[in-house]
Image: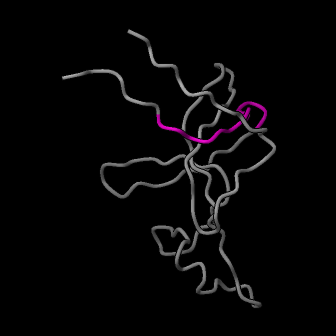
């Protein structure tokens, strides 16, 4: 029996950002390095800015996609985020902050691996 091979991942430069349609988000693989080593996991890249009118007030365009705080205020979210779950309220996003101790090494298109484990 042949063992399935994992898909080949094409990593992108960490100084580039994925093309994500305005008002949406997309799931990717990211590789990060911290003092404990290199880790690969999924993260979303969000392109959910707050668009404003000439006076600097949020306009209705972003009503369709903008995230809001528990107080109902718009939250700008453009960049890498991790989706978190909580048993007492809705899922939420946490911005990923990269620095000298938590460095983004690259990102890649997400392709879910084929499940080949337990068979009935």
| Residue closer to the observer: 63 or 110 | 110
Q: Residue 34: image x %, image y %? A: 68, 26
Q: Position of residue 6 (x, y in %)?
A: 53, 23
Residue 113 at x, y percent in the picture: 46, 31
The answer to if 108 sits in the magenta stretch is yes
Q: Is residue 97 magenta?
A: no
User: Which residue is rendered at x = 57% and y = 73% of the image?
Assistant: 74
Q: Give the number of marks.
A: 0
Picture coordinates of residue 15, whole percent (x, y): 81, 43
User: In this picture, which residue range is highlighted in magenta?
Assistant: 99-112
User: What residue is drawn where x is 45% and y is 68%?
Assistant: 70
Q: Quadrant of residue 73?
A: bottom right
Q: Which picture quadrant has residue 28?
A: top right
| 3 relative position to 30: left or right | left
User: Is residue 80 shown above or below 74?
Assistant: above
Left or right? Give the position of 56 relative to 82.
Answer: right
Instruction: Indicate left or right for 73 with 37 as reference.
Output: left
Relative to 83, does residue 49 appear above or below in the rendering? below
Furthest residue in direction top, as rendered: 1
Most extreme residue toward the front is 1
């Amino acid at each position: 029996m042949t063992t399935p091979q994992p898909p080949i991942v094409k990593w992108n430069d960490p100084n580039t950002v994925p093309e994500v349609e305005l008002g949406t988000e997309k799931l990717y693989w990211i590789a990060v390095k911290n003092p404990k080593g290199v880790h690969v996991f999924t993260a979303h890249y969000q392109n959910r800015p707050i668009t404003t009118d000439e006076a600097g007030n949020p306009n209705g365009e972003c009503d369709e996609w903008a995230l809001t705080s528990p107080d109902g205020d718009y939250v700008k979210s453009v960049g890498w985020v991790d989706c978190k779950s909580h048993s007492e309220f809705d899922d939420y996003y946490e911005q990923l902050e990269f620095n000298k101790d938590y460095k983004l090494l690259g990102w890649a298109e997400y392709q879910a691996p084929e499940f080949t484990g337990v068979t009935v």
